[in-house]
Amino acid sequence: GFARRMTAYKRPTFVFADRERLIRIAKRQPFQIVFAGKAHPQDWEGKKLIQEIFKQVKELSPHLKIAFLEDYDLEIAKRMVSGVDLWLNTPQKPFEASGTSGMKAAHNGVLHFSVLDGWWIEGCLEGITGWSIGSPPDEKSENEVQREIEDFYGKLEYAILPVFRNHREEWIKLMKNAIGKLAPYFNSHRMMKRYLSEAYFHQPALFTMNNRQT
């Protein structure tokens, strides 16, 4: 699932970077992509991205199931973050400030597949709470976009879909990991504690991700 504001740095059409490979993967291991989102009224590039998605939906329809849910609102967002099996996030680094939709999805046991930016830098335990796309923030790649593309298709084909389709118990275990390891940390209770302790009273953080057990 991919549901959020449609704008250039979010790269909603990233999934179509290599259409031939996407089709090959879908033929061997069928899956569906569900899009939802709106562009700001003055974001013309964002509107063009939505038009491009509709074009891809039409052209790829003989090979791959793709849906775009129109009139995106809070109700659709709620159903998406609780109803899809995998949450996809492909922002251009380093422009993802947070990524709260992925946090909400994790609370519902939805696994995350994302570029290492925003919250996913902290939240990603590879193959445990989800999967990463591309290099970590402290590692520079000469051709980062190409690495992200290879990571995306490679992990989708060999790491994600085989487990989802053939090892359901393992997938359920990963869903429990998402809830058990991410939800206790990425929540509004901790946010308020840190605002109080660090912004208002200037005390060290009360809780860190290092406390998690893998």
Image: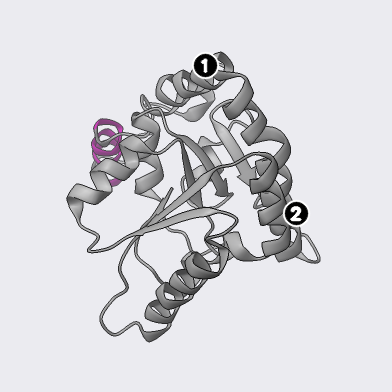
Q: Residues within 10 Å of mark 1 (few under 14, many from 20)?
A: few
Q: Is residue 120 above or below residue 110?
A: below
Tell me which numbered mark, 1 or 2, is placed earlier along the sequence. 2
The percent coordinates of residue 186 (x first, y second) are 37, 34
The percent coordinates of residue 138 (x first, y second) are 69, 51
Q: Quadrant of residue 67?
A: bottom left
Q: Is residue 198 visible?
A: no
| Magenta-drawn stretch contains 194 | yes
Start-end of magenta stretch:
189-199
Q: Is residue 165 visible?
A: yes
User: Which residue is the site of mark 2?
Assistant: 150
Q: Quadrant of residue 213?
A: top right
Residue located farthest toward the right when viewing the structure as drawn = 142
The residue located at (34%, 30%) in the rendering is: 107
Q: Is residue 25 above or below residue 167?
A: below
The percent coordinates of residue 100 (x first, y second) are 35, 47
| Magenta-drawn stretch contains 70 | no
213 sits left or right of 195 in the view: right
The amino acid marked with disc number 1 is Lys
The residue located at (23%, 37%) in the rendering is: 192
171 sits left or right of 83 in the view: right
Image color mode: one colour
- Give the quarter of the figure containing the C terminus: top right
The amino acid marked with disc number 2 is Glu
Foreground pick, 138 / 151: 151
The residue located at (67%, 63%) in the rendering is: 19
Question: Could you tell me which secondary element the residue under label 1 belongs to?
Answer: helix
Question: Could you tell me which secondary element the residue under label 2 belongs to?
Answer: helix
The percent coordinates of residue 148 (x first, y second) are 69, 56
Q: Main secondary structure of the magenta part?
A: helix
Q: CA distance from mark 1 to mark 2?
A: 26 Å
User: Which disc, if any, is residue 173?
Assistant: 1
